[in-house]
Image (spheres, rainbow, N blue to C red):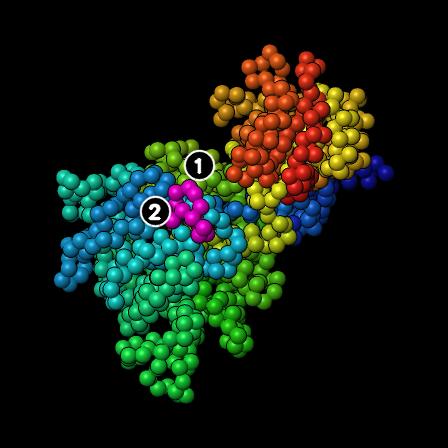
Amino acid sequence: MQKLKTLIFLYCLPISLFSAERSWIRINQLGYLEESIKIAVLVSKEDFTLSQFEVCNALTDKVELQSKNINKFGEWGAFKSSYRLNFSELKKSGAYYIKAGNIKSPVFRISDDIYNGAADFLLNYMRQQRCGYNPFLKDSCHTRDGFIIYHPTLDSTYIDVKGGWHDASDYLQYVTTSANATLQMLFAYQQNPNSFGDYFDANSDAGSNEIPDILDEAKWGVDWLLRMNPEKDFMFNQIADDRDHMGFRLPTEDTINYGKPRQKNQRFAERPVYFINGQPQGVLKHKNRTTGVASTAAKYASAFALASQLLNDYYPELTDVLIQKSIDAYEFAQEFPGVCQTAPCRAPYFYEEDNWVDDVQLASVLVHKVNKVHKVCKVHKACTESANADECVHKVESGDKENVVDEYFHKAIEFGRGEKVTPWMGADTARHYQWYPFINLGHYYLASSKDKKISKEFISYIKDGLEKIFQRGKANPFQFGIPFIWCSNNLVAAAMTQARLYHQLTGDTRYLEMEASLRDWLFGCNPWGTSMIVGFPKFGDYPIDPHSAFTHVYNYPIDGGLVDGPVYGSIFNNLIGIKLYNDDEYSEFQSDLVVYHDDWGDYSTNEPTMDGTASLTYYFSALEKLGSSKTKQKKFEKSHGGIIQGDKTEKEIYLVFTGHEFADGGESILETLKKHNVIASFFFTGDFYRNENFKGLIGEIKKDGHYLGAHSDKHLLYCDWINRDSLLISKQEFFEDIKNNYKEMEKFGINPSDAKFFIPPFEWYNEKIVEWCDELGITLVNFTRGTYSNADYTLPEMKNYLSSEEIYNRILNFDSTNPSRLNGVILLIHVGSDPKRIDKFYHKLDDLIRNLKDNSYNFVSMSTLN
């Protein structure tokens, strides 16, 4: 028996005694949808054997799952051992952490609402990247763009091409990336329109304009593309060049001289606008390898064609213009095949795009779609120039109009067969933007064809690309088959998009785990444990020192920006001008294989890009759609991040009661609620729940079917009354306070999953408290401002004292004067008050409920706010 005990001890030794300080569990910090694949990755500097792990409830520390679903991968990158921990079987919503021996993961959530607002969040960065009027700075920049170069007769001539987006943290502008970003956002809206809100106007200033914000942003791109393509066969490819890199400054302070200094009455100098001539360009030492115009012209065509469909409801006057523009651009691409690369200048770096058939394929199918929708044949000049363009004069095999229009479709198939798989997929390396766009959406559109033969063919091409990525990544613990080249995160976005579209087309589950791994990589399941999106999730580890003048020089946040992502150590070590300016907090995770630095000096891994960010909008909107299909989203009004009012269009009132040390109104309140058949919500502190004198009342509340929730454990003041941003409690103290509250609630059979709403003590909080609540999977709510029901705690000697009659009248006055009346309000009343307050408001509850019911209001439980 002693020998058996010794063997058991030795078997358990590797699990329990390896160093937690040299081992880490990487998770998706944002969390997981309830039905999604859920896999964490444990990495360690030590070699050990792991046989099981646990998933624990973050609010109660109870073990929710014990699992041996583990795959060992051994040495990889900076780590000696690595494991994949699969906990997909856990589907219950809540906040959790993983324990493996003495290693503990950060807290994460499982919920179908985790991606709500994620796609809209990305648009924060797009708005900040705007050129011309910049809504973030409430100022304008580059208003004198620009003067033409590379045109045979118009060199140095001024042309108005202001607008668009700055490409990244520099202020260059490229049609290559801008047209693709425009199309990506249009595609996201086309696929998942209900995932986008309307919080900003066309200028991206706060305020609804009854147009989804993503279409406002795409329209901004379309307007710029129209300026960059003012006439048929007259296009420009970029504004400015790498002379822009001479200095870190805001775009509104740009003083770079490109050869035409600004005049005395001008705030900005003109910047060069590169005319597309189909030949190599570069005004100084370095030149590109341009061979034609098709790659850029086709991107114009695709953006114009899709915009003509999706902007039609809001800008009908643009529809015909955009259709004609798309046809003209498409014909230009056909006439001059080849790549049109961006132009370098002082440095050898540029977008080295070497493929163009994918661009023309996508343009073919999208131009085909708009012509088919509008039943107009404009394929051939003879038709376009005829008196009646609806009557095709060009004869094809069968001689009918539909076959002429279908010529676009057949061209799309032809070009699609020319590049079956985007060449970076499965490759170990590629030059900068060599195979761009990183995803070929032309394949998706053809795979969606009603022609089953064509659909099957192009589905197979999509699958072939995914299989190459899958095979390349299956041997490493992160299942990461993306090459660590410059802008690797953009490739991640492309691969995730392709995997999601493939699954939607086929239902095939082969690549779902790979897709999940790529998604989780962006949110922290990577060697460094950091999100790759600035400011997201708010409570997580994310880039705080990106390569951006906005942040580094002016300390402005650039929320929503997707940073370039990790690169091979060999790439980082050979790029010009890279220098780390701060200690590397991720030093122990770096390797010769791959590096990432949250340092403004590293433009190779930590610079956000506009097109990469835009390319995530589809995927995030798709995940929001997946979650929202199972959860009905309600409209809220928020203050400092917390919900303070429900849907203003519904005649519903949330009647809530809070309690800490007093409960003198409990029995009276319950009797009144029962009399009027009203369900209310009660939020108590841990001290209230553990008070022996209140246990009977709590039992009655629960028996009557009212909602019971948390109000903190010790009723601590979380933030300063005057300086609200100043916290008076640490994150750990907050977590412990909340957890102790829920532990007391569990003694009454109140499960955390049934009590997700939380009212802060003193009804006082800030955005950081809301972030911490989100991390724990609870939702902070508070009373609706202006109702004054919460003033029932005040005493006569206080300056802010209100009598019960005054409170009652103010509630009714709110109903008569507020535009949305009492719709969706949260009326907060205390379940008891200091004995020194003799005038108890709960005695007015009977009259209040009767009055409000007479006005057709319904009282609803806080549980319906989900």
Which residue shows up at 65% across the image and 41% down it? Answer: 856
Where residue 523 sits: x, y (%)?
53, 45
N-term mark: 1 or 2: 2
Which of the 4 image quadrants contains residue 660?
top right
Quadrant in which the N terminus appears = top right
Residue 116 to residue 310: above or below: above
Q: Which of 411 and 596 lies nearest the eye of the viewer?
A: 411
Point 49% across, 64% down: residue: 465
Q: Secondary structure at mark 2?
A: loop
Residue type, mark 1 in image: Ile
Report which residue position mark 1 lands on: 544
Please rate how many residues cluster around mark 1, counting C-alpha atoms within 10 Å: few if below 14, some from 14 to 19, many from 20.
some
What is the number of the mark on residue 130? 2
Label 1 – label 2 distance at C-alpha: 21 Å
Front residue (pair 492, 6): 492
Verify whether residue 172 appears in magenta: no
Of the residues tagged 1 and 2, which is closer to the observer?
2
* Residue 128 rendering spot, x and y as whole percentages: 37, 43
Q: In the displayed structure, would residue 430 be above or below residue 610?
A: below
Tag 2: residue type?
Arg
Q: Determine the residue positioned at 52% across, 21% down.
A: 720
Extent of the magenta region: 201-213
- Provide the secondary structure element on which disc 1 rests: loop
Q: Residues within 10 Å of mark 2 (few under 14, many from 20)?
A: many
